[in-house]
Each structure stands twice: as structure tokens, then as C-alpha cells.
Amino acid sequence: MAPPDKVVVHPLVLLSIVDHYSRVAKDTRKRVVGVMLGVKDSKGRIDVTNSYAVPFEEDEKDPSIWFLDHSYHETMFAMFKKINAKELVVGWYSTGPKLREADLDIHDLITNYNPNPVLVIVDVQPKELGIPTKAYYCIDAVSEDGTQKAQKTFMHIQSEIGAYEAEEIGVEHLLRDVKDAKVSTLADQVISKVHALKGLEERLKEIKQYLDAVLSERLPINHEIMGQLQDVFNLLPNLNMEQMVTAFAVKSNDMMLVMYLSSLVRSVVALHNLINNKVVNKESERAKDAAEEGIVAPADKGKEKEKGKETEKEKEKA
């Protein structure tokens, strides 16, 4: 079996971890710990599809003193296995938000249920945009000169947020219920675009820092990363082409024309409503003045003439 290469955390797991933290350690400096269930393929990809909380305590003054109820874990795992036998123990999670001294010891305990588990640290209160998960697995670090014994240490691996089709539908319905009704759809779209652009800015800054470190020889050249960056730049459109510039100009002019016409229509409709309002106000003022002076309005005079003609016709018939 290949070593872990990528960890895909599913939405249900994130919701369970946030709920666990809110119930146990909200507004405190404590962290919560739990076990992750999922599947692992032959290429090293791990899909974390489920999780459950485990009672955990640690001494804030002495990080080496901690307690994890593995009996509770074994009971919970036995019940989960009855529901879905395909889900196995793939690792454990922590709300860190960083690695701690006791994490290697906890990791050794989890190896009793999986020979090569992963640790996922979930930042439940992220201060920066991006994926709130970081994944690690344990390796034996050997010194180059061979004078020291091999020591276990954590190695960072790629992590991402993924979901099956059924989970995506459930998340969409959940977000639909969570959305604020006071915020319009357009405002929501603008906010999403702003967050996306901020995230892109952070990624570009990280790329710049990495390239600066490589140029200054503080970091060695990683040809795999360079190849991926080259693929990114190759996918960028060539904006210096005359056809591309013309197409952008035509598209922008069409959109601006629609906005200009809509502004004209709104102005005409507002002016029309203003004129109608003035006409109605003048008629009401005239009627009020006529009523105060005892003068019958022309329309009322016409009605009185018609009534007089009707009474004369009735008299002639009689």
C-alpha cells in the first residue's frame, strides 16, 4: 500500500468537527480530538467521509500529560462498522490550530488501529482565506551523518475539500437555508467574488515568496513545482492579440450600452411619474379651492344638467 499522498476531507467531517468544538471547547484555549473514518485507494489518496469525537484531556502546564479514551473509540468504531463496513480508521483530527508536543504520542496510539494514519488539523476559527485543513503523516527522520537515532516527525501532505454528488446537493440546500434574506443575490455574488480575489491574491503572494526564496538560494529548486507554475502561466490568455482586445472592447461596449439604456429608461419613467404626480396634486388643489369657495366644478355642472334633463323627461311622461 502506497504511503498517504493526498487527504480529501468531506463536508460532513468538517461540520462534525465544528460541532464538536462548539460543544466542548468554544471560547477556551482547549482543543478537541476525534477519529476519522474513510477509505484509501492504491495511489495513496485518502477520502475522509466520517468522523466522531473522542473524550480527550491534556494538561495545559505539562503537554506531555494527556488522556484519550481509546475504549470509547473502540466502542464507537464497532457501531460505525455495523453501519458501513467499508469505512476504516484512516487517522485522527485535532483543532490545534498547530502541531503540539503530545501529537506524536497520540499518533502512536492511533497506529494500533491503522499502521499508517494521518493527522488533520482543522482551524475552526480561520483568520485567513483558504482551506482550513492541514494534513500530516509520520515518518522516520534519519540524520545525514548517521550519528543520531531515527526520530519520528510529521511530514506535511496535500489536503483539499471534496464531496460526492449527493453531499454537494446536501451542502447546497444547507447553504440556501443559511443565506441571509436581507442580502440580495447580487450583493452575495459580489461578496463571493471579493473573497475569491482575496484568496487569489494570497496564493500569488505565496508563489512570489517561494520564487524569491529560490532565486536567493534559500530553497532548492523543485522541478515539480516549477512545472506546475509553468502550466499555470501557459493557461493564461494572450491579451496582446488584436482579436482578443477587440473582443473585450466589443463585449464591454455592449454591456455599457445596456447599462446606459437602462439608466435612460429609469430616468424617463421617474420623470413620467413626477409629471403625473404634479397633475394629480394640481387637480386635488383645484377641487379643494372650489369646495371652499362654493363654486361647482365644471364636471359637477355637467352632471347637474344631466340630472335636470332626466327630471324634465319624467315630468313629461307623467
Image (cartoon, grey):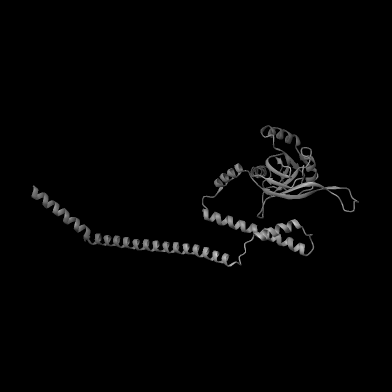
Q: Taking 274 as reference, is 13 left or right?
A: right
Q: Residue at x 24, y 61 (%)?
A: 290
As drawn, 215 above or below 63: below
Task: Classify residue 205 by image quadrant.
Answer: bottom right
Q: Residue at x 53, y 56 (%)?
A: 187
Q: Can you say which quadrant of the picture contains the N terminus?
A: top right
Q: Taking 240 as reference, is 98 left or right?
A: right
Q: Position of residue 180 (x, y in %)?
A: 54, 50
Q: Residue at x 74, y 34 (%)?
A: 74
Q: Taking 213 as reference, is 178 left or right?
A: left
Q: What residue occupies the far right of the structure in this picture?
A: 147
Nearest the viewer among 150 and 248 is: 248
Q: Position of residue 244 (x, y in %)?
A: 57, 64
Q: Position of residue 262 (x, y in %)?
A: 44, 61
Nearest the viewer among 67 and 294 is: 67
Q: Residue at x 73, y 57 (%)?
A: 225
Q: Position of residue 104 (x, y in %)?
A: 80, 45
